[in-house]
Image (cartoon, coloured by chain):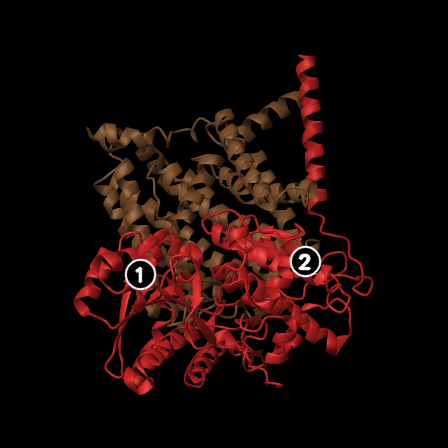
Chain colours: A red, B brown
Amino acid sequence: MSLQGRGLRVSTMRWLAAAATIGLSFAVGAVASAEDAKTQYFPLSTFRVGAYASSGIPVWAGVIDYFRYINEVEGGINGVKLVWDECETNWEVEKGVECYERVKAGKNGSPVPIFLPHGDPISKALTEKSAADKIPLVTIAYGRTEAIDGRVFPYSFPVVFSFWSEASSAVNFIAEKVGGKEKLKGLKIATVYHDSPYGKETQVPLAHLAKTYGFEDIQIPVPHPGNDQSAQWAKIRQLKPDWVFLRGWGVMTPVAIKTAAKVGFPVDHIIGGIWSGSEEDVRPAGSVAKGYLAITPFPAGSNFEIHQKLKTYILDKGLSDLKDPKSFGSVYYNSGVDEAIISVEAIRTAQAHFGVRPINGEEAQWGLEHLDLSEKRLAEIGATGLEQPLKLSAKDHEGGGAGKVLQWDGEKWNIVSDGWVRSDRELLLPLIYERAAAYAKEKGIKAREATN
Amino acid sequence: MSSVSSNAIGDFVSPRAANRPPHTILGAGLALAALGTLAAVPLMANDYWLNAVLIPFLIMSLTGLGLNLLMGYAGQASLGTGGFMSVGAYATYNLLLRLPELPLPVSLLLGGVIAGLVGLIAGLLSLRIKGFYLVASTLATQFFLEWLFNQYGWFSNYSTSSSISAPRLAILGHDLSSPTGRYLLTLATVAVVTVIAVRLVRSQTGLTWMAIRDMDTAAEVIGIPIASGKLKAFFVSSLIIGIAGALWAFAYLGTVDARSFNLDRSFQVMFIIILGGMGSIVGNYLGAAFMILLPILLDHIAAGLFGGSIDPGQLENLQKAFFGGLIIWFLIKEPNGLAALAARLGSRLSASLRR
């Protein structure tokens, strides 16, 4: 009896000890003043496990390699070195919110300048929270399109290439191919899309462009996950569109390419969107993918100047985060490098205004709104051709709005468009501002005055 | 034949609430103490605790409670939980948007009632089919609702990405959009609903549900109204789940689309009640704590112990494996869920204190 009693007491003690550990582990980092910090904290939310891990892993490698390059070769941003840690989100919204809340207070006195949510639902859930905490969210080629209007969404930055710009650039590339925008009249352009909020996002701009240019806009949904598309492609065979714009996600893209080959639709008349345009999307389709096109703000290739630097100083020295060296210069790797360049340059811009020290979210927001990545600056970085010139302002949180078209040759992507294919932003921006204004009205937000 | 099919799920949803000793006074005391502690939390906790830990924990407990009434008490298994949550969220959103003069609690309740009615319609099938067949039909409800909100822009006021975002949250002019405000709104709702649920399961309705669960044929023979009992269970359960869905959308995330309420969510809620204990109110809180809080805790411990020294991808996989192992261990230790485990620990503790 007494033995049992003692056993119970021992186990109670153990529980108490465990509880104490819990308490300690939750006590969030000591608060030091920002002036003491000499390094710039930059938390990374990643998804190294879960359904989309294979596309995520090269992205963080791109980000981390560029950060290491900045630290090792350039000695930090004007001498302020970057420190980062990772928080795993599994691409799930709850875990993403948890990560954001965990890191938002900064680390060892160094504030968070920018948060990259890496996941569309996560970026949505953080829209209001990040505005309240004054931490800018940078979402490249995803996120809320209306957030381009920084007067209503001061802390959301869907920079470079929104889905609306993606659709418009794809149409403009077709125009380039057929010999001018006036030749678009009478063409049939079918959009085969992932039936989800993401997939439906291009319906409004395409309808508007179809009305403007006189092409016929056909919309064909593919239910998630899209591993059988015989019905959709049978319909395409029947409707005989001139071009197919493929907005897939995950397994949907290779299946679409294979099914198109089966019904005899020419693969070089299929243009994939941003998330249908990586190596991982076409390799599983095998040889029939040869000739497939894709529009992307992240051109593939490892011959850009920055890649030479990364190779010499990071990869060859064994400092790279890449597990598979074949991914060097892939679309996803380059998207990570892009993201890192924009973040670093925004911090640099903010430093020029507020002083050379770790930058907080509010200052980085100013830095982003005054970011001017000119051709000259891109050449200095070594990102000419990799990254498009980008100028942001309070009224325009997108800035670029152009993509390059890649063609798969069976082994790798080649750039086939004539430089950057611009979208008709001047045509679409009024519609975007209208939607932002409707959002502001619904939420009772008073749009701020644009300062620049 | 039909008895075979009903027993298949009956194994899984077995009677046990009735044979637990009634620690009513002690239980109520503990619950009040827990409520008091939780209400005092905003005085000391930071945003992290409120936004990322306590709010999702409370809302998932509430969702678990909703499903537990249906599955644990009335014995009707359902995989439509995510769908009913989305009905609550979208209905509340539209009420707040289109009838701004309604106060927030009324919109929340009405949103729940609409979800309850949808649940009632889905529950009509339970009058004819049982067990795993019913699970399959609720699965259809889940897929239909997800499709509906994605397909028709009206539900999301034609937003670009079919997402809905909370209009200003306020009660009697008090702005509730701060983390503390959203937390207190959640806590108050969960407390009120829990009290109602406790009273409900002890009432005639609760007894009817348990009779249906334990053996519906026998219940019918002795004159218990089976049909109305089942439909009531679907209505009340979906109402609570609907309110939880609205809180999930507006008090927790802020902006959501239908993907937040997919089949994974339905499974998550079902795991919460299986782990927590079916036919138990407190089990929902324990189950939600296990499913929501434990992975966060593991992550903190892993980051503290191994952060930087192990590849982050590997570390995450190890955590998942460990968490999976824990689930299996707990279910072997106590197949009736954490609530039964807690009750056993409690009685052992009180016995040793008396000694």
Instruction: Indicate the secondary structure of the residue bearing disc 1.
Output: helix
The three-letter code of the residue at mark 1 reads Leu
> Residue B317: where, in percent of width, then height?
54, 40
Residue at (70% x, 23% y) in the render: A9
Q: Residue furthest right?
A: A36
Q: For residue B208, what is the image quadrant?
A: top left
Q: Amino acid at mark 2?
A: Tyr
Q: Residue at x 34, y 70 (%)?
A: B154
Query: Residue A164's x, y, as percent?
Result: 42, 74
Is any atom of residue B188 visible in this view? no
The tag on residue A313 is 2
Q: Closer to the camera, A412 or A214?
A: A412
Dot 2 surroundings within 10 Å: few (below 14), some, or many (20 or more)? some
x%, y% of residue B50? 61, 54
Residue A375 rendering spot, x and y as whole percentages: 59, 79
Q: Are marks 1 and 2 on the same chain?
A: no
Count of all numbered marks drawn on residues in the image: 2
Q: Chain letter for mark 1, please.
A: B
Viewer-side label of 1, 2: 2
Q: Is residue B302 left or right of residue B138?
A: right
In the picture of the structure, the residue carrying the numbered disc 1 is B148
Q: Which residue lies at the image location 27% right of the left edge and 45% below the top edge?
A: B137
Residue at (69% x, 59% y) in the render? A105
Compute the Cα span from label 1 to label 2: 52 Å
| A11 vs A263, nearest the viewer | A263
Camera-side residue of A337 and B310 = A337
Instruction: State which chain disc 2 sits on.
Output: A
Q: Is residue B317 above or below residue B177?
A: above
